[in-house]
Image (tube, rainbow, N blue to C red):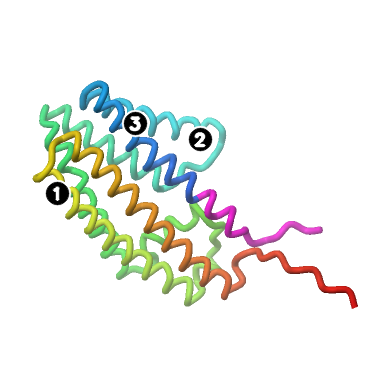
């Protein structure tokens, strides 16, 4: 029997979960643990080592590095270099809010173009072709998901700034880790649910058909 030409929803969800775990959850947890048992510089080194190690492993095994992993590694590198250059770790913790705002602005600006940011990242999770991307409903999906993630980034930036001003460093790191993980998981869940509904209606997901009952 020929292999299905469209992916299963379960495979897409596993791939998305693996990307979130690799690029978001593990480096955040490593950062918090190393901050608690060591100091800020140990935490920075651990998070960076994980990101670069994950990228090197994927490249060495000829696996594709997701856009999310590139974004995480790039953001961590910029914040670490700035902190080392200034010796001011407070700026490191403020920068995520600034970065989230910058990402939200990029997402919003991309809405005016032919390919919103989510359309550019979709290939990390689905075998996207030009024909599929040209579907009107798929294009609307990309537009609305890009807008949603821009709003989530702005919410995350606001919460980060508020936590930094009102809590201690250890509480801030723990709370922000929980907030960012929660937002990422919730956003991913909504993205998968909405995208799966559109994909099914456009026959872009493999669905196992029940065998006909014997006559």
Number of residues whose C-alpha sits closer than 10 Å to that of mark 3, classed few (under 14), some (14–19) or many (20 or more): some
Distance (Cα) linking label 1 and label 3: 22 Å
How crowded pointer 2 is (Cα within 10 Å; few <14, some 14-19, many 20+) is rated as some
Q: In which quarter of the image is residue 114?
A: bottom left
Q: Position of residue 141 (x, y in %)?
A: 43, 70
Instruction: Tell me the residue at 25%/26% (across/down).
Output: 36
Q: Would you name the residue on which mark 3 appears?
A: 30
The magenta region covers 1-15
- Queried whether the magenta region covers residue 86, the answer comes back as no
The answer to whether 128 is drawn above or below residue 95 in the figure is: below
* Residue 30 x %, y %: 34, 31
Sequence order check: which comes first, mark 1 or mark 2? 2
In the picture provided, is 124 more to the left or to the right than 211?
Answer: left
Quadrant occupied by the N terminus? bottom right
Q: Name the residue under label 1.
A: 161
Q: In this view, does 198 lie above or below 93?
A: below
Image point (34%, 42%), residue name: 72
- Earlier in the chain: of badge 1 and badge 3, it is 3
Q: Of helix, strand and loop, which one carries label 1?
A: helix
Q: Residue at x 50, y 67 (%)?
A: 133
Q: Position of residue 208 (x, y in %)?
A: 71, 64
Residue at image location 48% in from the left, 76% down from the top: 137
Camera-nearest residue between 13 and 108: 13
As measured in the structure, the alpha-carbon distance from the residue carrying label 1 to the one carrying label 2 is 34 Å
Q: Which mark is residue 58?
A: 2
């Amino acid at each position: 029997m020929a292999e299905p030409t469209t992916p299963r929803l379960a495979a897409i969800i596993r791939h998305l979960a693996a990307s979130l775990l690799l690029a978001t959850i593990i480096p955040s947890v490593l950062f918090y643990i190393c901050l608690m048992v060591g100091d800020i510089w140990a935490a920075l080194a651990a998070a960076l080592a994980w990101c670069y190690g994950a990228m090197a492993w994927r490249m060495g095994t000829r696996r594709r590095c997701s856009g999310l992993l590139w974004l995480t590694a790039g953001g961590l590198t910029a914040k670490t270099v700035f902190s080392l250059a200034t010796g001011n770790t407070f700026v490191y913790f403020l920068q995520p809010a600034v970065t989230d705002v910058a990402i939200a602005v990029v997402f919003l600006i991309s809405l005016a173009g032919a390919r919103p940011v989510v359309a550019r990242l979709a290939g990390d999770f689905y075998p996207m072709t030009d024909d599929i991307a040209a579907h009107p409903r798929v294009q609307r999906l990309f537009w609305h998901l890009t807008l949603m993630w821009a709003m989530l980034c702005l919410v995350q930036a606001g919460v980060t700034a508020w936590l930094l001003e009102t809590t201690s460093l250890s509480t801030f790191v723990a709370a922000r880790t929980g907030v960012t993980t929660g937002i990422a998981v919730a956003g991913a869940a909504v993205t998968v649910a909405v995208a799966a509904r559109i994909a099914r209606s456009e026959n872009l997901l493999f669905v196992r058909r029940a065998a006909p009952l014997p006559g």
